[in-house]
Image (cartoon, rainbow, N blue to C red):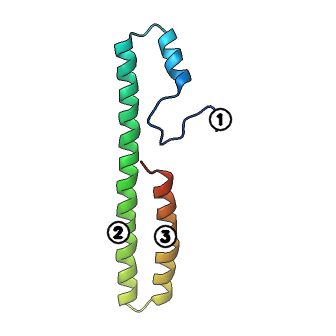
Amino acid sequence: MPGKNPPTALLPNPQIIKQLAEAGLTPELLTEIIIEDRRGKQRFAERNSIMGGLCFITVVVGFVYLIMHGHDIAAGTLIGIETLAIVRLMLQNRL
């Protein structure tokens, strides 16, 4: 996506800063907008990491449950596919 920040970027796009400055915003208000934008992106990344961790724990618990009840193939499939999916999502949404 040329011209756009990736979702994990903590710095706003310079074009956005320029447009806000041209709109007549005071430097204090511009700074507050930038800080709030960073906070929102940080919260988003933190929530994604927490959800990824919870999903991982759920998969591990499901894996142990299936192994204990003799469903080895299902357990292997669960831990293999779901772990790869969770790792991919966590890497996409890393801080």
Amino acid type at image mark 2:
Ile
Which label number is shown at residue 2?
Answer: 1
Between the residue at mark 1 and the residue at mark 2, the CA separation in whole angstroms equals: 36 Å
Which residue is painted at 46% across and 76% down in the image? 79
Give the label, 3 or 1, closer to the camera: 1
Which label number is shown at residue 43?
Answer: none
- Point out residue 21 in the picture as x, y percentages from the top left corner: 48, 12
Residue 6 horizontal side relative to residue 95, left or right: right
Amino acid type at image mark 1:
Pro
* Residue annotated with mark 2: 57
* Residue annotated with mark 3: 82
Mark sitting earlier along the chain (1/2): 1
Amino acid type at image mark 3:
Glu
Mark sitting earlier along the chain (3/1): 1
Q: How crowded is mark 3: few (under 14 residues within 10 Å), some or many (20 or more)?
A: some
Residue 3 horizontal side relative to residue 86, left or right: right
Compared to 13, does 66 lie above or below?
below
Residue 29 horizontal side relative to residue 18, left or right: left
